[in-house]
Amino acid sequence: MDAPLRGDVVEFHVAGSADPARTLTELRSYWDSLRKGRAVPDRADVEPKGIRRALDYAFILERIAPGAARFRLAGRHLIDVMGMEVRGMPVCSLLNPGSRGRLSDVLETVFKGPQIAEVTLRSEAGYGRPPLTGRMLFLPLKSDLGDVTRALGCLVTDGQIGRGPRRFDLTRDAVFPVIEGAQPLSPRPGGLADDPAPWRPPVLARAVRQPLRGDETPEERRARFRIVVERRDN
């Protein structure tokens, strides 16, 4: 179980708007500083003082299934974007249904690679909702058990939030190896890789009986029963 960054209640407050590129760069630099020669740092290494300027936009994810993760901790900006508390919610809830599959594929490579991922988002304008763009960063972390099932990330938007909740379409994604020069793992759609084999009915066995004769003995009647196997092909 993840411990809070500091205290029982975590409140992320940063005045003013953030520059998306700068915030993502600062968070990634902080994550790099935690590695200390390791491919992936530990969740326990993350402390708020290291990401003071990005704290309002930061979050911690927990992988709960292939391609699925939920917010364990989240900054004030995510609460403002969604218009509600997001802790415990799946990260895909930020996206419109048509983009959730791709986010799931990208997110799974973060844990499986492990590797770094960045996505670009867009939320269309609507009543009380100006057009809004955003960027998300996902940085893998190890849990207390040593498996890569946590991620440090951030969401930074550009524009007025307006009425929440705001949900986004994923317009671009990119993945990067944690070790320079390594080949990143390309996101691929989940599910079965091959078409399932066509269904065939089971082989049936039935008893076939010949016409009775009045002069048969019990032994002869039993001997006339035979098993016939029928095979059906599609």
Image (cartoon, helix red, strand yellow):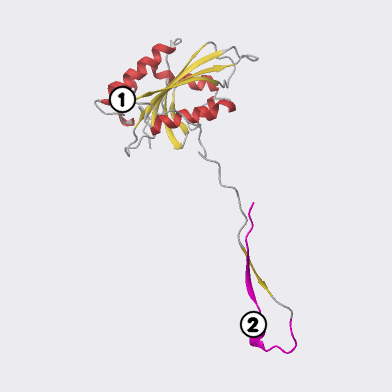
Q: Is residue 172 magenta?
A: no
Query: From what the image shows, is residue 48 above or below residue 224?
Result: above
Query: From what the image shows, is residue 21 above or below residue 6?
Result: above
Residue plotted at (50% across, 22% down): 79
Q: Which residues are magenta?
A: 212-234
Residue plotted at (43% across, 17% down): 13
Residue 230 visible in the picture: yes
Tell me the quarter of the picture where residue 185 sits.
Answer: top left
Residue at numbered disc 1: 179
222 relative position to 147: left or right: right
Query: In the depicted view, which residue is nearer to us: 114 or 24?
Result: 114
> Could you say where residue 114 lies in the image, as x and y percent from the top left?
36, 30
Tell me the quarter of the picture where residue 146 sits.
Answer: top left
41 relative position to 103: left or right: left
164 relative position to 29: left or right: right
Whether label 2 touches label 1, CB < 8 Å: no
Q: Is residue 224 magenta?
A: yes
Tell me the quarter of the picture where residue 233 sits.
Answer: bottom right
> Could you say where residue 95 lies in the image, as x and y percent from the top left?
55, 25
Q: Residues within 10 Å of mark 2 (few under 14, many from 20)?
A: few
Q: Which amino acid is tagged 1?
A: Ile
Residue plotted at (54% across, 30% down): 101
Quadrant for the N terminus in the image: top left
Residue 63 circle label = none
Q: Which amino acid is tagged 2?
A: Arg
Residue at numbered disc 2: 222
Residue 49 visible in the picture: no
> Could you say where residue 131 lies in the image, as x and y percent from the top left?
58, 12
Residue at disc 2, secondary structure: helix
